[in-house]
Image (cartoon, grey):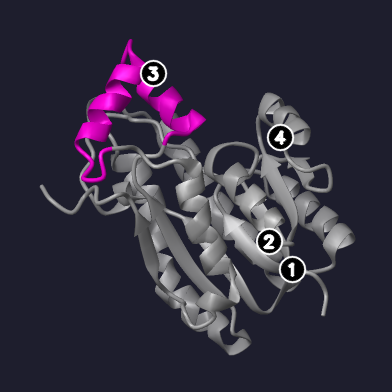
């Protein structure tokens, strides 16, 4: 039996990078993608040297074709596809414009969907597909309507996709992080707050567990969904939020 192999979009920082490290430590061959050159360069320095790090814009179907081709050449097949690339920028309704809307849906919905479409021939029977959604898709967060809609669209697709993939025993599930301490989170907070650490501390006080999630908290759930222990789990959403969103 060939070794397990995983492709992780948005895998050069934050949750995706932590998932790459978690799966690699479990014996997976791993490929990750990232868009920003600086993030890609850092990942090449910090991830294990046998991790395949590719620069790609998930909005570009041509880039996705190239990623799939390189993964095919390196691994031959995939046992795990972690669709983690995403953008989340607070955009209040009264200042929203078409460009912000189009970019968010191009990454969070179109990009993720067509990565699955194009990677499907590489997925082995019994493979695992995992999609990062986030609690904002189903819980009210001011200024989050566009991001919620884009992630929510993927969440709505999962039951149907689970049935379509079931004949090959391919599982597809969502992992929905709560507030997580990632570079993207810090950047989003910094766009509206002059004191990012203080704002994050205030956010942590509103979480029942008293802290923000770490990328490793989410990566552990991803590793479970990729494993044989989750072989009978499909069409589901697992929320990893430390209790955030359970009370008003």
Q: CA distance from mark 3 to mark 4?
A: 23 Å
Neighbor class of circle 3 (other Cα within 10 Å; few <14, some 14-19, many 20+) is: some
- What label sits on residue 4 in the rendered view? 1
Labels 2 & 3 near each other (Cβ < 8 A): no
Neighbor class of circle 4 (other Cα within 10 Å; few <14, some 14-19, many 20+) is: many
Name the mark nearer the viewer: 2 or 4: 2
Residue with the mark numbered 4: 43
Labels 2 & 1 near each other (Cβ < 8 A): yes
**How far across and how far down the image is residue 35, in percent?**
66, 35
Mark 2 or mark 4, earlier in chain: 2
**How far across and how far down the image is residue 139, in percent?**
23, 50
**How far across and how far down the image is residue 133, in percent?**
42, 53
- Quarter of the figure that contains the N terminus: bottom right
- What label sits on residue 26 in the rendered view? 2
Secondary structure predominantly adopted by residues drawn in magenta: helix
Q: CA distance from mark 2 to mark 4?
A: 19 Å
Q: Label 3's element?
A: helix
Mark 2 or mark 1, earlier in chain: 1
């Amino acid at each position: 039996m060939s070794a397990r192999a995983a492709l992780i979009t948005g895998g050069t920082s934050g949750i995706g990078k932590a998932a790459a490290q978690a799966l690699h430590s479990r014996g997976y061959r791993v490929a990750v993608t990232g868009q920003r050159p600086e993030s890609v360069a850092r990942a090449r320095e910090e991830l294990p040297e046998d991790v395949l790090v590719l620069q790609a814009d998930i909005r570009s179907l041509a880039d996705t074709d190239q990623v799939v081709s390189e993964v095919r050449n390196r691994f031959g097949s995939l046992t795990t596809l972690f669709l983690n690339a995403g953008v989340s920028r607070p955009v209040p309704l009264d200042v929203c414009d078409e460009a912000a809307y189009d970019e968010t849906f191009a990454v969070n919905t179109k990009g993720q969907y067509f990565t699955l479409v194009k990677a499907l021939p590489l997925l082995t029977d019994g493979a695992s597909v995992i999609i990062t959604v986030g609690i904002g898709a189903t819980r009210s967060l001011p200024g989050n309507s566009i991001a919620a809609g884009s992630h929510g669209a993927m969440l709505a697709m999962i039951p149907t996709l689970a049935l379509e993939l079931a004949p090959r025993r391919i599982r597809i599930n969502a992992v929905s992080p709560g507030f997580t301490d990632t570079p993207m989170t810090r950047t989003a907070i910094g766009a509206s707050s002059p004191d990012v650490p203080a704002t994050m501390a205030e956010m942590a006080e509103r979480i029942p567990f008293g802290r923000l999630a770490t990328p490793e908290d989410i990566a552990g759930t991803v590793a479970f969904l990729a494993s044989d222990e989750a072989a009978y789990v499909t069409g589901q959403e697992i929320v990893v939020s430390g209790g955030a969103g359970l009370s008003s």
